[in-house]
Amino acid sequence: MKPDRAERSADAIRELIVTGRLTPGQRLSEQSVSESLDVSRNTLREAFRILVHEGLLVRRPNAGVAVAKPALADIVDIYRVRRLIEVPVLAAGDPAHPGARMMRDAVDAALAARLGGDWRDIAAANMRFHSGIVALAGSPRLDRVHANLSAELRLSFGLLGDNGAFFDGFVDRNAGLLRRFLAGDADGAAADLNRYLADSERTLQTMVDDAGAADAADTVGQ
Amino acid sequence: MKPDRAERSADAIRELIVTGRLTPGQRLSEQSVSESLDVSRNTLREAFRILVHEGLLVRRPNAGVAVAKPALADIVDIYRVRRLIEVPVLAAGDPAHPGARMMRDAVDAALAARLGGDWRDIAAANMRFHSGIVALAGSPRLDRVHANLSAELRLSFGLLGDNGAFFDGFVDRNAGLLRRFLAGDADGAAADLNRYLADSERTLQTMVDDAGAADAADTVGQ
DNA sequence: ACCATCCTGACTGTTGAACAATCCGGCTCA
DNA sequence: TGAGCCGGATTGTTCAACAGTCAGGATGGT
């Protein structure tokens, strides 16, 4: 119930990253961050290790850590892995599994959030939807891997402006996919999901491409 | 080319774990380990963070870290994920990809090692074979995840005595699978792999079961 | 002899301070 | 303008300290 300080610091920083309050490429000074989180430098370094290991921070020798700046290749990679995981899991999933309930709740939340109008809520619900899919497998390791990918993906969203129209189109598709899955057509749902992931990858790619072309030649992320 | 000290320490400890020189459940004192690796306690703590995050060490509050002791459920989980990853990757793999060469080299090494008689070499070659399969996907993230799973698996092997007969039967199957794949029958090879993983999971399970029954009631690993 | 209690020692979790090595930005000087 | 130099700031790493906590032995009563 009570994680140690380093882990809590890592959680706090991770939250800042995935919510976009820390922008990709931004450098994190040990001193200032440790002061603002009220932990010692040594403890903070342990937190940094975790996040570097998760790929949310990158370490530059003798220049500390900075928020990772996913390149196009990274986004492609993330989607490839997600597809590899989610599609077969959904195809083999059981509608009675608790994960299905997560999916349903997420769809409801997404629909409500669309009325509310805050695209962040929609994005969060969307993430939970996909976590629900992975949960169908009942594999702790798979859950961890997927949670990690989600975090990296949310970080990639930070490369776009607050462009929320992105998710709007997917809410209905999620709902349709879920209906199909709950009706017993897991294979059909999996096929939907496959198309869904391909489409959203393509969309995100072009968006990042454009945004990348905008702020031109700051290819620090290597 | 020159990782920092914490990472090198983590590498060193990881090596000790996967080669079985550190037994599951064994507790690692910060003081003694830091002395033997010649790093400070703080630096060693960063190394511990990495390994805990990888699941090779477990942290017990106020009692430091200990080598993880995978339960039966963990082995099942590892194999489930491996299957989920490796089978479709192999099915979609291209025999011209560099990963195929890794597979071939690994098979050759395994055949040679069988003559040599050291089962550790066979095990290592087997691991490389499967790494080669995953490499076919060309996904850095998938490679990382799989490397992690391999490490955990090797740790599980530590629960058995130096029982090397385990791998003997698989060498030929690897060779046959590879032949099939190189001949262009990726789907057939993937089906072989699926059976392979199911069999080896079953074998390993019973072995761990027996070994676990042997040293009876030391269920510290929880 | 048995049991609960207390105590002590060891270890972890966390911090602050220190210092060499390294890097970045600005300055000097040609 | 540009090459080279310098100083300040930051990282990488270590050490020493201390409170909190745990395990196990010593203690003492019954």
Image (cartoon, coloured by chain):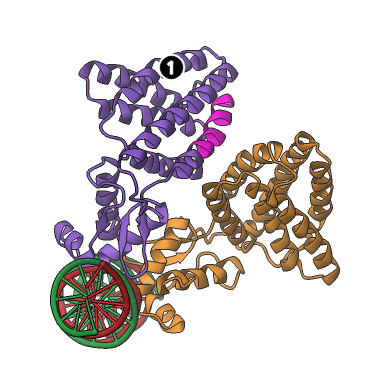
Chain colours: A purple, B orange, C green, D red
Relative to B139, D19 lies left or right:
left
**Is residue A105 placed above or below B44 in the rendered structure?**
above
Q: Amino acid at mark 1?
A: Arg
Q: x, y percentage for residue A192?
A: 53, 19
Q: x, y percentage for residue B69?
A: 53, 59
Q: Mark 1 highlights which residue?
A: A173
Highlighted range, magenta: A79-94
**Is residue A172 placed above or below B165 in the rendered structure?**
above
Relative to B15, A208 lies left or right:
left
Q: x, y percentage for residue C26?
A: 15, 70
Question: Which element type, helix, strand or loop, lies under badge 1?
Answer: helix
Residue A131 shows in this picture: no
Pick the front one: B60 or B50: B50
**Is residue C13 placed above or below B77 in the rendered structure?**
below
Pick the quarter of the image with the C terminus of chain B.
bottom left
The residue at the point 51 percent across, 42 percent down is: A77
The residue at the point 55 percent across, 22 percent down is: A190
Q: Residues within 10 Å of mark 1 (few under 14, many from 20)?
A: some
The residue at the point 39 percent across, 63 percent down is: B49
Chain ID, mark 1: A
**Is residue B73 placed above or below A113 in the rendered structure?**
below
Dividing the picture into quadrants, the one containing residue B207 is bottom right
The residue at the point 45 percent across, 42 percent down is: A72
